[in-house]
Structure formats: structure tokens, C-alpha cells
Image (tube, helix red, strand yellow):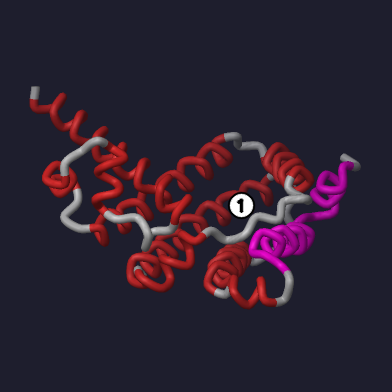
């Protein structure tokens, strides 16, 4: 019985996080109050506070759950154990998103301005998580002969993830020059991929293998 109660409690907590996340993404964090979230959920504030003592804690746990989601997706790719498929998927994604001109949502503005500590913790957690997966991908690629044998994998993983973090931090500068963060990521990833692949890997990347 106690186990069932714990599961139900965790499900309720995840439901709150999911609902709040959707509202934050649409409207921005600053403009969404706890009252708004409770109204959307049909929940009393008293019940809400059982799960989250404050809005700050809700934001922190929402960001942590986002890292967990990213990690699960990256783990799926790693479990393919086939770097060729990984490159093919990357190429397909790049082509599908060529016309994508999405902008950074209000959510990021609010995180930087009103929740700097939570945002900094989130970026650090993302950095470590994604850097380790990138490193694992590159090691797999080296074993298959598709990534350059002389590549410093640790440094390459750090550089790529730092570029991603810096792009989020400086998106205002990027947009002031007529570009958006997605366009920067697209171009940077293309340059990065070309730089790490062996001749065989490049042939695959260009659709010649």
C-alpha cells in the first residue's frame, strides 16, 4: 500500500511539472503564478505545496527533469551501437530543419533574468551529462573507423558542449546580428562533424557511402 501511495505521489508530482512546463513555455515563467498552475490543474494551493514548497523549487525540478529527458534520448542513440546510424540520423535531422527559424522562447529570457541560480545549475548539469554522451559517441565512432583516430575526444566533447552553452547564454547577441540560436547550432554542428570524421565518415556524411 505504501509503495502504491509513493507511485501515485510521484505521478502527481510529474503531472504538476509537465503542466507547469507547458504553461511556462507558452507564456513565460514570470507571467505564470502558482495560482494559475493550480487553476489549470484543478488543484488547491495546499496540495501544490505538498509537492513544491515554492515556485523556485518547481522551476529547479522542472529543469532537472529536462536534463533527465535529454539523457534518456541520448542513451537511446548510444544503445544503437552503430555510429553509421547516428550519422545518418544527424544528416536527416539537419536537412529537415534547414528552414527552421525558431527563436528562443520567453522561457529562456525569464530563466536568465529571474532564476539565474537554477539556470546556472541546469546548464552545468546539462554540460556534464551531454559532454559524457558526446564522448561516448565519439569513442564508438573511432572504434568503427568513422571518427579520426588522432582526435582528442575529451577536448572535442568539451568544446562542442561549451559552444552549445555559450549559444544559450549569448542568444541576444546572435539575434541582434539577424540570426537565431538554432541557425548557429546548425552551422556549428556541421563544422564540428566535418572536423571529427575520418575520410570514410565524411563519405557517409556526404551520402557517398
State whether the magenta stretch is mostly helix, strand or loop.
Answer: helix
Q: What's drawn in magenta, residue-wise?
A: 179-207
User: Which of 118 and 103 lies nearest the eye of the viewer?
Assistant: 103
| Residue 75, visible in the rendered structure | yes
Q: Give the residue displayed 77% in from the left and 50% down from the top.
A: 99
Would residue 195 be counted in the magenta stretch?
yes
The picture places residue 15, in percent across and down from the top left corner, at 31, 37
The residue at the far left in this view is 2
User: Which of 78 and 51 lies nearest the eye of the viewer?
Assistant: 51
The picture places residue 186, in percent across and down from the top left corner, at 72, 58
Q: Which residue is mark 1?
A: 139
Q: Give the residue displayed 53% in from the left and 37% down from the top.
A: 76
User: Which of 4 and 136 lies nearest the eye of the viewer?
Assistant: 4
The residue at the far top in this view is 1
Q: Quadrant of residue 7?
A: top left
Determine whether 57 is above or below 121 in the image.
above
Left/right of residue 190 with respect to residue 72 in the rendered view: right
Q: Give the residue displayed 30% in from the left and 53% down from the top.
A: 61
The picture places residue 75, in percent across and down from the top left corner, at 50, 41
Would residue 209 be counted in the magenta stretch?
no
Which quarter of the rendered picture does the N terminus lie within? top left
Check disc 1 and report its element: helix, strand or loop: helix
The picture places residue 153, in percent across and down from the top left corner, at 61, 62
Q: Give the residue displayed 87% in from the left and 40% down from the top.
A: 209
| Residue 150, visible in the rendered structure | no
Determine whether 38 is above or below 8 in the image.
below
- Within 10 Å of disc 1 (Cα), the crowding (few <14, some 14-19, many 20+) is some
Amino acid at each position: 500500500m505504501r509503495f502504491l501511495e509513493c507511485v501515485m505521489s510521484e505521478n502527481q508530482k510529474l503531472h504538476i511539472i509537465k503542466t507547469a512546463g507547458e504553461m511556462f513555455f507558452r507564456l513565460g515563467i514570470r507571467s505564470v503564478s502558482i495560482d494559475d498552475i493550480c487553476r489549470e490543474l484543478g488543484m488547491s494551493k495546499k496540495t501544490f505545496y505538498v509537492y513544491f514548497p515554492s515556485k523556485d523549487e518547481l522551476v529547479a525540478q522542472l529543469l532537472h527533469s529536462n536534463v533527465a529527458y535529454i539523457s534518456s534520448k541520448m542513451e537511446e542513440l548510444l544503445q544503437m551501437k552503430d555510429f553509421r546510424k547516428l550519422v545518418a540520423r544527424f544528416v536527416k535531422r539537419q536537412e529537415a530543419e534547414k528552414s527552421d527559424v525558431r527563436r528562443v522562447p520567453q522561457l529562456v529570457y525569464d530563466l536568465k533574468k529571474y532564476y539565474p541560480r537554477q539556470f546556472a545549475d541546469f546548464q552545468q548539469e546539462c554540460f556534464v551529462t551531454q559532454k559524457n554522451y558526446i564522448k561516448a559517441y565519439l569513442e564508438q565512432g573511432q572504434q568503427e573507423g568513422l571518427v579520426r583516430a588522432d582526435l582528442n575526444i575529451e577536448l572535442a566533447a568539451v568544446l562542442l558542449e561549451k559552444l552549445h552553452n555559450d549559444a544559450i547564454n549569448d542568444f541576444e547577441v546572435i539575434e541582434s546580428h539577424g540570426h537565431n540560436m538554432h541557425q548557429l547550432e546548425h552551422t556549428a554542428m556541421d563544422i564540428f562533424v566535418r572536423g571529427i570524421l575520418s575520410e570514410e565518415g565524411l563519405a557517409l556524411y556526404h551520402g557517398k557511402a
